[in-house]
Image (spheres, rainbow, N blue to C red):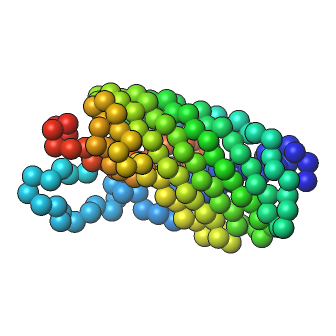
Amino acid sequence: MKSRAKIGLITALHLALGAAAYTQTQSPASNPVPNTTQKGAPMPTHAHGPFEVKLTPQPPEDKADGSTLGKLLLDKTYHGDLEATAKGQMLTAMTDVKGSAGYVAIERVTGTLHGRNGSFVLQHSSTLTRGAPQQSITVVPDSGTGQLDGLTGKMIVIIADGKHSYDFEYTLPMALNH
């Protein structure tokens, strides 16, 4: 497979996993969590908005044993409730089986979340098993800084009509969450 074709497939993998995962998963906003928190515990908050992503492919690994490994640099700009930039890295694996692939990524997000300044790290792990998607994007524990210290949460990437957006369900300690 030529290098350009590999790069195109890797980019398509990222987009397909994001789009497919959302189509198979309800948005957290449409699936409220029952109130099982103790009195005084912080309640989850939602942040929504669009984002742009630039993927810069790195030299791909050679194909071996039915799979192709790839690496991309991520450069994102978030808008809406999260006004931030992010830098990160993605590792991908594509197989010879149509609809089966996976990626992991780490990105550091720096900016403001509902007006609170700081940074945090997101960890991605997504798979596509013969077309069945699974997406997991979570805040790395204790990665929040500044006014985002203590941040926990999970994000869903939504891709519709070629445009990216996010739904971020998060919690901050009570002292910062008002």
User: Is residue 50 shown above or below 71?
Assistant: above
Please state the horizontal and vertical placement of residue 112, each as a whole percent of the image: 36, 29
**Quadrant of the frame with the C terminus:** top left
Q: Classify residue 55 by image quadrant.
A: top right
Residue 58 horizontal side relative to residue 34, left or right: right
On the image, the x and y values in percent for residue 74 come to: 61, 37
Q: Is residue 155 visible?
A: yes
Residue at left 74%, top 50%?
70
Location of residue 153 with respect to 97 vertically, above or below: above
Residue at 16 percent across and 61 percent down: it is: 37
In the rendered image, the residue lying farthest to the front is 142
Residue placed farthest to the left in the image?
Answer: 39
Left or right of 149? Residue 121 is right
| Residue 98 location, quadrant | bottom right
Q: Residue at x 33, y 54 (%)?
A: 29
**Nearer to the camera, 141 or 66:** 141
